[in-house]
C-alpha cells in the first residue's frame, strides 16, 4: 500500500508516497496517472520548450530529452502458504473501499520489479518475503489516460505472520474456496487468482511453484534513464524523497518516474529461432539478439512484442508462450516465443540489425556472442524442445 500524499504533505518515513492513479498500491481507472504528462516544464533542464510528438510523447527543444508515455509498471506479491494465498482488505480509502486484493503497487525508477513486490508486501502486510519467481504472465490494464499499466505478479513465501498496516483493514489467508470472489477489488486480481487455480494440481489449493520461465536481473543495455531535476509544473528544483519519487522545493508537488516497459518476440520456424546481429552504433554491437523494443501508450506486452518483431525483421509471428522476464532498475523486458506465420526475414526492413538468421540448436551462437536476454531465452527454448 502507498500512503496517500498530496501537495505539501510528506510521506510516512521510509515509504514511497502514493503515485497518482494508485489506490492502496493498485492500478485503478482514474484520471491521468502522472500529471507531468501535460505539465509545461522539462524535468531534465527546466525549459518550457516542450513540443508534442507522436502518441502523446513530448520532446524538449532545449535539451532534446523526450518525455515518454510508456505503460506504467505495477508489481504484485502473491504470497502462498499451505495452499492459501494472502489477501488484504482495503480500508476506508477513496476507491473500492472494503474490497480484497493482493499486495502490490507501482514500481519506482531505480527499483527492480521483485524488490517492489517485496516492498509492497512489507508496507501492506508487515511481512518480509522471499521471491520465488513469476506467479502469472504479465497482464495489461487499460486506463483512461491511454497509457495503461503492466502488472508483474511474483510468487512469494514468508515465515512472518501478516498484520494489517496503514489503510489495510484486514489480512486473510484464503484457499480458492475461501476467496471472497464477489468482493475482489479489481478484475485483474480476479484474473490472477483464477489463473492460479487453473494451473494448480488441486483446485482447492493455490500452487506454490512459479511459472516455468526464465527470469534474471541483467543490465538492459539501453542505458539509464535520466533522473528528473526540475518540477514539471513550476520549474522549481526537485528533491529526491524515495525510490521513484521527488518533491518540488518550490510548489511542493510530487513527481514520479518509473522503469520503462519493453517486450520482444522470438519467432520460431522448423525448430529454429530468428535472431539479428546488432548494428555498430548501439550497445552490444555485433552480438546476436531477439527483436525487442519499448512499449507505446496503451500497448499490452504481447502487442509490443509482435509490433517490434515485424518492424525489425519483416516477420510476423503468433505469441504462443511466455519465455521470460528480465529487469534492472530502469527497464524491464517481457519476452515471448511463437511460430512465424508470414514474412521473409530481412535486415533491410528496418536497420536495427546488420544480419538476420534462423538458428537451430547446433548453430546457435555461444552465450558470449548473445546480447542481453538472448543467452537466457535461447537456452530456455532448447530446454523446452522448441529449438532443436
Image (spheres, rainbow, N blue to C red):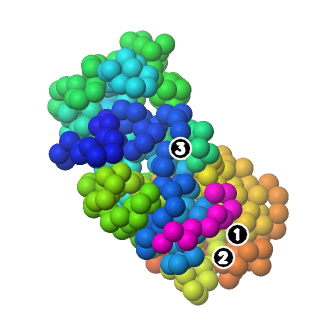
Q: Between residue 259 and residue 285, name the one nearer to us.
A: 259
- In which quadrant will I find the C terminus? bottom right
Residue range in magenta is: 47-56
| Residue 104 location (% of width, % of height) | 37, 37
Kindly report which numbered mark, 2 or 3, lies closer to the viewer in this rendering: 3
- The answer to whether residue 344 is above or below residue 301 is below
Assess whether mark 2 and mark 1 are in contact (beta carbons under 8 angstroms).
yes
For label 3, the crowd category at 10 Å Cα-Cα, with few meaning under 14, some 14 to 19 and many 20 or more, is some
254 sits left or right of 140 in the view: left
- The answer to whether residue 214 is above or below residue 204 is below
Which residue was labeled with disc 1? 312
- Lower position in the chain sequence, tag 2 or tag 3: 3
Task: Say which mark, if any, is on residue 245.
Answer: none
- The answer to whether residue 309 is above or below residue 63 is above
For label 1, the crowd category at 10 Å Cα-Cα, with few meaning under 14, some 14 to 19 and many 20 or more, is many
Which residue was labeled with disc 3? 32
- In which quadrant will I find the N terminus? top left
The answer to which quarter of the image holds residue 185 is top left
| Residue 211 location (% of width, % of height) | 46, 41
The answer to which quarter of the image holds residue 74 is top left
Task: Say which mark, if any, is on residue 352.
Answer: 2
Amino acid at each position: 500500500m502507498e500512503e496517500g500524499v498530496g501537495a505539501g504533505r510528506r510521506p510516512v518515513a521510509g515509504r514511497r508516497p502514493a503515485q497518482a492513479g494508485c489506490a492502496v498500491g493498485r492500478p485503478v481507472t482514474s484520471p491521468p496517472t502522472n500529471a507531468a504528462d501535460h505539465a509545461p516544464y522539462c524535468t531534465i533542464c527546466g525549459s518550457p520548450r516542450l513540443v508534442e510528438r507522436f502518441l502523446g510523447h513530448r520532446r524538449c527543444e532545449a535539451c532534446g530529452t523526450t518525455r515518454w508515455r510508456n505503460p506504467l509498471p505495477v508489481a504484485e506479491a502473491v504470497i502462498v502458504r499451505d495452499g492459501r494465498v494472502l489477501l488484504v482488505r482495503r480500508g476506508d480509502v477513496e476507491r473500492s473501499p472494503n474490497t480484497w486484493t493482493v499486495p502490490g503497487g507501482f514500481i519506482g525508477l531505480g527499483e527492480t520489479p521483485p524488490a517492489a513486490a517485496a516492498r509492497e508486501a512489507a508496507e501492506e502486510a508487515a511481512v518480509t518475503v522471499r521471491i520465488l519467481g513469476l506467479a502469472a504472465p504479465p497482464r495489461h490494464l487499460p486506463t483512461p489516460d491511454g497509457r495503461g499499466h503492466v502488472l508483474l505478479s511474483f510468487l512469494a513465501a514468508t515465515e512472518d505472520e501478516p498484520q494489517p498496516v496503514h489503510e489495510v483493514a484486514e489480512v486473510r489467508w484464503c484457499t480458492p474456496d475461501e476467496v471472497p470472489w464477489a468482493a475482489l477489488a479489481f478484475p485483474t486480481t480476479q484474473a490472477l487468482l483464477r489463473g492460479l487455480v487453473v494451473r494448480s494440481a488441486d483446485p482447492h489449493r493455490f500452487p506454490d511453484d512459479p511459472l516455468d520461465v526464465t527470469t534474471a536481473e541483467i543490465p538492459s543495455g539501453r542505458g539509464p534513464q535520466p533522473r528528473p531535476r526540475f518540477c514539471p509544473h513550476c520549474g522549481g528544483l526537485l528533491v529526491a524523497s524515495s525510490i521513484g519519487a521527488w518533491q518540488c522545493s518550490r510548489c511542493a508537488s510530487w513527481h514520479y518516474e518509473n522503469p520503462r516497459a519493453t517486450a520482444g518476440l522470438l519467432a520460431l520456424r522448423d525448430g529454429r529461432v530468428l535472431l539479428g546481429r546488432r548494428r555498430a552504433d548501439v550497445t552490444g554491437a555485433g552480438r546476436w539478439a531477439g527483436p525487442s523494443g519499448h512499449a507505446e501508450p496503451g500497448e499490452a506486452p504481447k502487442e509490443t512484442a509482435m509490433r517490434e518483431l515485424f518492424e525489425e525483421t519483416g516477420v510476423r509471428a503468433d505469441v504462443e508462450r511466455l519465455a521470460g522476464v528480465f529487469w534492472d532498475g530502469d527497464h524491464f523486458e517481457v519476452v515471448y516465443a511463437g511460430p512465424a506465420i508470414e514474412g521473409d526475414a530481412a535486415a533491410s526492413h528496418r536497420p536495427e540489425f546488420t544480419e538476420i538468421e534462423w538458428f537451430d540448436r547446433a548453430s546457435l551462437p555461444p552465450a558470449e556472442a548473445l546480447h542481453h536476454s538472448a543467452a537466457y531465452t535461447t537456452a530456455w527454448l532448447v530446454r523446452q524442445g522448441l529449438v532443436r
